[in-house]
Image: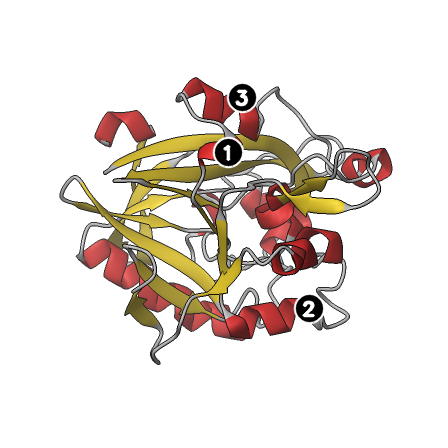
């Protein structure tokens, strides 16, 4: 097995929305805002090369939305999914599986593209199976008013219409080893229903792709919960249980959305779980 980081692009989000009830005077120390109150956000995916399978975890925003849409998110930098795949010697056609932690636009938008004559949409990975889970799919395709703007039908429905969509089978319990893909999955419900958090055994370590359970290193303290979470009081125990386990078992946490701290470890302190070490991916893997 070999794992590569895939840079799908960078954008900005409102710092207040990203930290909920936490005052700016506190979160601005770890995630400094610009003059528009926006903080740096990354969309960094993982690519797992395992035998004859090439598994991409999340796909970023993609590029098919309107100029007005992207204007809300202040895109920055020149990273994109195709350039990053090419850097490692791959193209979209090489991808065999696309695993989506959840179906918010900044995690799955790159899974679907315009068709050739821009009359409709098609999967951006023509040879891939797209993986979600049935509960989250139903949640996303019948969205509540709070999340409706994050679940865009053009990002989601073409995967099913193409026949390339499959569901991870759940066997009960929050954590399970996936029979469809060779890694463990933690199911969490605070941010959105049945978000999936991959746990990957790699080079004798456990690498956890954090998605929106822990967006940035600045979100480690328990009350630091995004305003985007649909069930923030459920995020609290989910995050606490996970972080305590991560500290005890020396997990390496891959932060999809942190533009400046890519892999971290945490430790127990008198104040609870806190940041221990920050690494570049290639330093440890």
Residue denoted by label 3: 83
- Name the residue nearer the viewer: 85 or 144: 85
Q: Is residue 229 visible?
A: yes
Where does residue 40 sit, x and y in percent of width and height? 60, 34
**Farthest residue in the bottom direction?**
172
Residue 73 appears in which quarter of the rendering? top right
Residue denoted by label 1: 93
Tell me, for residue 77, which label it has, or none: none
Q: Secondary structure at mark 1?
A: helix
Q: CA distance from mark 2 to mark 1?
A: 27 Å
Where does residue 232 sit, x and y in percent of width and height? 56, 69
Q: Secondary structure at mark 3?
A: helix
Name the residue rendered at 23%, 55% in the picture: 247
Q: Earlier in the sequence, mark 1 or mark 3?
A: 3
Residue denoted by label 2: 141
Where does residue 67 sit, x and y in percent of width and height? 83, 33
The mark lying in front, picked from 2 and 1, is 1
Name the residue rendered at 49%, 36% in the picture: 44
The mark lying in front, picked from 1 and 3, is 1
- Name the residue nearer the viewer: 207 or 183: 183
Name the residue rendered at 36%, 55% in the picture: 198
**189 w.r.t. 7: above or below:** below
* Tag 2 near tag 1, CB within 8 Å: no
Where does residue 129 sit, x and y in percent of width and height? 48, 52
Q: CA distance from mark 1 to mark 3?
A: 14 Å
Which corner quadrant holds the N terminus?
top left
Residue 152 appears in which quarter of the rendering? bottom right
């Amino acid at each position: 097995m070999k794992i590569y980081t895939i840079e799908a692009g960078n954008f900005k989000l409102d710092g207040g929305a990203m930290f909920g009830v936490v005052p700016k005077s506190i979160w601005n120390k770890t995630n400094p805002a610009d003059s528009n109150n926006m903080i740096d956000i990354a969309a960094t995916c993982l690519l797992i090369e395992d035998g004859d399978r090439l598994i991409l975890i999340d796909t970023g925003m993609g590029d098919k939305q309107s100029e007005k849409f992207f204007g809300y998110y202040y895109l920055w930098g020149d990273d994109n999914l195709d350039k990053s795949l090419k850097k490692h010697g791959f193209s979209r056609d090489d991808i065999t599986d696309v695993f989506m932690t959840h179906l918010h636009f900044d995690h799955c938008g790159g899974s679907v593209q315009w068709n050739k004559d821009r009359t409709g949409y098609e999967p951006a990975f023509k040879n891939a199976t797209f993986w979600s889970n049935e509960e989250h799919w139903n949640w996303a395709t019948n969205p509540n008013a709070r999340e409706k703007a994050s679940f865009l039908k053009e990002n989601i429905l073409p995967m099913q219409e193409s026949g390339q969509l499959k569901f991870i089978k759940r066997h009960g319990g929050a954590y399970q080893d996936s029979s469809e893909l060779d890694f463990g999955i933690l199911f969490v419900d605070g941010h959105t229903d049945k978000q999936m958090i991959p746990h990957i055994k790699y080079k004798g370590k456990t690498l956890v792709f954090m998605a929106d359970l822990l967006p940035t290193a600045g979100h480690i303290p328990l009350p630091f919960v995004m305003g985007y979470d649909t069930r923030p009081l459920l995020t609290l125990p989910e995050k606490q249980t996970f972080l305590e386990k991560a500290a005890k078992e020396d997990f390496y946490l891959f932060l999809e959305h942190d533009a400046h701290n890519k892999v971290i470890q945490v430790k127990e302190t008198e104040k609870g779980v806190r940041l221990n070490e920050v690494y570049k991916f290639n330093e440890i893997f």
